Amino acid sequence: MAAKKPNVLAASRNDTELQPAALRDPALLLVSDWKMARYISLLLCRVQQRLESQIIVNPRIQGLTADSPTRVRDRPARILGGPQEYAVAREAEVFAMTEALKLQDSIPEVAATSLIGVIAKLEMIVGADRDIGDPTDFPWPHIASVLRDLRAIAGGLPVGHRSRERTRRDVAKHWESAVKLVAALGEYRW
């Protein structure tokens, strides 16, 4: 007979009635913020890539390839923005990823107060291994194995729901910072 998994955490970050002790775990709040920061950086990456693609194929914009004007001469030029908007999108993505990396760097300073908090910290560590050169080297597979074991014993992290309002607010925050940076760089003559 299989042992029943304990219901360590069955609530979202905002549902404080079900598991109030686990929800106060700083590691859970950290992983929630980290996941949101990574999500925002991926959204901004896609915006930047779309603008980059438009620059490559638009014959009226000095693009990233030398032959772009000749390849699309007969196509109508459609572009979401120009080089200025591309620069802003690129910098906004950098700001968002920097926020995610700062949260990742704070893992050692945040104490987990529950088993699910330990799982949350390991989720961040294993999630960060996707950004390194070779995630098959020691200790990455070993850490992932420990995480799988802990999930089997205690269950996984709660499924978070991203609100559109928060997503828009976070994207806007990074976009505004990038606009200011690009404008300041534009004023500075090299």
Image (spheres, rainbow, N blue to C red):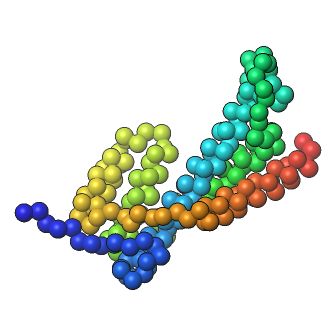
Q: Position of residue 47 (x, y in %)?
A: 66, 45
Q: Position of residue 151 (x, y in %)?
A: 28, 61
Classify residue 40 as left or right of residue 179.
left
Q: Position of residue 66 (x, y in %)?
A: 77, 20
Q: Position of residue 120 (x, y in %)?
A: 40, 64
Give the total number of marks visible in the rendering: 0
Q: Nearer the viewer, residue 29 or 81?
A: 81
The N terminus sits in image quarter: bottom left
Q: Nearer the viewer, residue 189 or 63?
A: 63
Which residue is pictured at 34% across the width and 72% down the height?
A: 10
Q: Is residue 51 above or below residue 65?
A: below
Q: Is residue 130 above or below residue 72?
A: below
Classify residue 10 as left or right of residue 176.
left
Is residue 40 in view?
Answer: yes
Which residue is pictured at 48% across the width and 44% down the height?
A: 132
Q: Nearer the viewer, residue 3 or 80?
A: 80
Classify residue 82 as left or right of residue 165.
right
Q: Is residue 180 above or below residue 136?
A: below
Is residue 102 in view?
Answer: no
Which residue is pictured at 23% across the width and 64% down the height?
A: 153
Q: Is residue 10 above or below residue 99?
A: below
Which residue is pictured at 76% across the width and 48% down the height?
A: 88
User: Quarter-wise, where is residue 72 in the image?
Assistant: top right
The C terminus sits in image quarter: top right
Classify residue 190 as left or right of residue 1.
right
